[in-house]
Image (cartoon, rainbow, N blue to C red):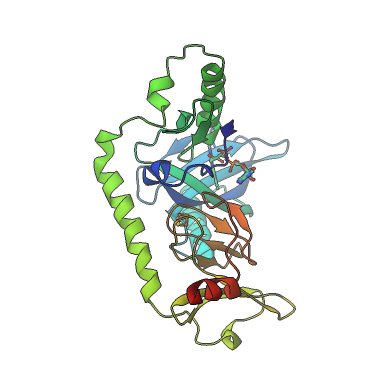
Amino acid sequence: MVVATNAPVNDRVAIHTKQAPYMTYVIGARVPRGSVPSVLSWDTGDPYHYIRVAPGAEEDVLIVGGEDHKSGQADDTGERHARLEAWTRARFPMVREIAFRWGGLIMETVDYLSFSGRNPGGADNVYIHTGDSGMGLTHGTIGGMLICDLILHRSNPWAALYDPSRKTVGAARDYTSENLNVARQYADWLTGGEVKSAGEIAKGSGALMRRGLQKIAAYRDESGVLHQCSAACPHLGCIVHWNRSESTWDCPCHGSRFDPYGKVMNGPANRDLASAERAVDKRAA
Ligand SMILES: Cc1cc2nc3c(=O)[nH]c(=O)nc-3n(C[C@H](O)[C@H](O)[C@H](O)COP(=O)(O)OP(=O)(O)OC[C@H]3O[C@@H](n4cnc5c(N)ncnc54)[C@H](O)[C@@H]3O)c2cc1C
Ligand code: FES
C-alpha cells in the first residue's frame, strides 16, 4: 500500500513531528510574450518569493509565489496576495492584469527533502510519500520512481536519502522550534471564544465559540442555518481555526483541514470533526 495523501493518514505521530504544514500563495500575471526570461528563480527572504513563466500563444503568465505561513495560524489571504502583487509590480513593470490568485497547503520537512519510502515502524508493505516542501514536481516524481523500485526489490541510490526513517540531526533547531510551535497551539483550549453568541456569526462564515470546557466550531451557511461541531481536531486534539478565504476549518498543528460542516478534506486526521452534541455527550460521560 502506498499512502500519498499529502499528509499521511496512516501515521499518527512519528512523521508529523518531522514536518510542518504551511499555506503558500501564488498569483499569475499576464505579461507580453517573451518579456520575462523563462527561468525558475527564487530569493532567500523570509517570507520568500519565487517566479516562473508559463508560456502562452499570445501572452505569457508570470507566476509569482511565496508569502507562506503555518496552516491555521493566519487568516489574511487577501493581504498576502496584495503583497505578492506589489512585490511583482515593483520588479516587473511589464505586468498587465493579475489573472489568477490561489493558494494551498504544503508539508515542509525539517531538512526540506521529501519522505519517500517505507512507513517508519510500519509493516514491510506500507510506503509513504509526503513532505514535498513546495517542490512536488521534483519530489513527487522521485518518490514515484523510488517507491516503485522498493516494491520491486530493486536497489535505488536515493533510498537512504529520502528514507522516512532517516535521522535529521542537522536540522535539530528547526525540529525543536516547529514542535514547540505545535505545543503552543494547545493553549487555544484555555482561551475564550471568538464570538460570545452564535448571533454574531454572519452568513457564510465561521467562528469559535466556548461552551463550558468545549470549543465549538460554528458555521452559519448562506441560508442562515447554524452548523456546530467540536473544534477539537480528531488527529491529536488541537483547536481548528476558520479560514475565511477558503471557507475551511484548518488545524494549526499538523495540517488537517475540514469543510465548513466539519467533513475531513486533508489528513493526518482520518475522521470528521465530532458533532457538537456528541462532543458534549462525551464530556458528560
Ligand atoms: C500554491 C501552491 C504552489 C505550489 N507550487 C509548486 C511549484 O511551483 N513547484 C512544485 O514542484 N511544487 C509546487 N507546489 C507543491 C505541490 O503542488 C505539492 O507538493 C504536490 O501537489 C503534493 O503532491 P501529493 O500527491 O503528495 O499530494 P496532493 O496533490 O495533495 O494529493 C493528495 C491526494 O490524496 C487525496 N486524499 C487525501 N486524504 C485522503 C484519504 N484519507 N483517502 C483517500 N484519498 C485522500 C487528496 O484528495 C489528493 O487527491 C505548490 C503547492 C501549492 C499549494
Ligand atoms: S492535524 Fe494534528 S492535531 Fe490537528
- Compared with 56, 30 (above or below) is below
Tell me where residue 204 sits by quadrant: bottom right
Q: Residue at x 54, y 31 (%)?
A: 140
Identify whether 127 is placed above or below 6.
above
Q: Relative to the observer, which residue lies in front, 60 or 186?
A: 186
Q: Quadrant of ligand 1?
A: top right
Instruction: Residue 24: give x, y in percent of width and height.
Output: 50, 51
Q: In the rendered picture of this protein, how many numbered marks are placed on residues?
A: 0
Residue appearing at x 39%, y 71% in the figure = 189
Q: Residue at x 71, y 81 (%)?
A: 224
Position of residue 259 in the picture relative to residue 110 (left or right) = right
Q: Is residue 188 above or below residue 167?
A: below
Q: Residue furthest right?
A: 223
Residue 1 image offset from top left, x and y in percent:
59, 30
Say which quarter of the image contains residue 212: bottom left
Q: Check the image and name the residue furthest to the front.
A: 285
Residue 101 visible in rendering: yes
Q: Nearer the viewer, residue 183 or 66?
A: 183
Instruction: Specify whether 70 is left or right of 148.
Output: left
Where residue 92 appears, x then y in whole percent? 51, 47
Residue 35 in view in this figure: no
> Is 162 left, or right, of 249 in this rendering?
left
Q: Position of residue 272 (x, y in %)?
A: 60, 59
Q: Is residue 186 above or below residue 54?
A: below
Residue at image location 58% in from the left, 55% down from the top: 271
**Viewer-proximal residue among 90 and 147:** 147
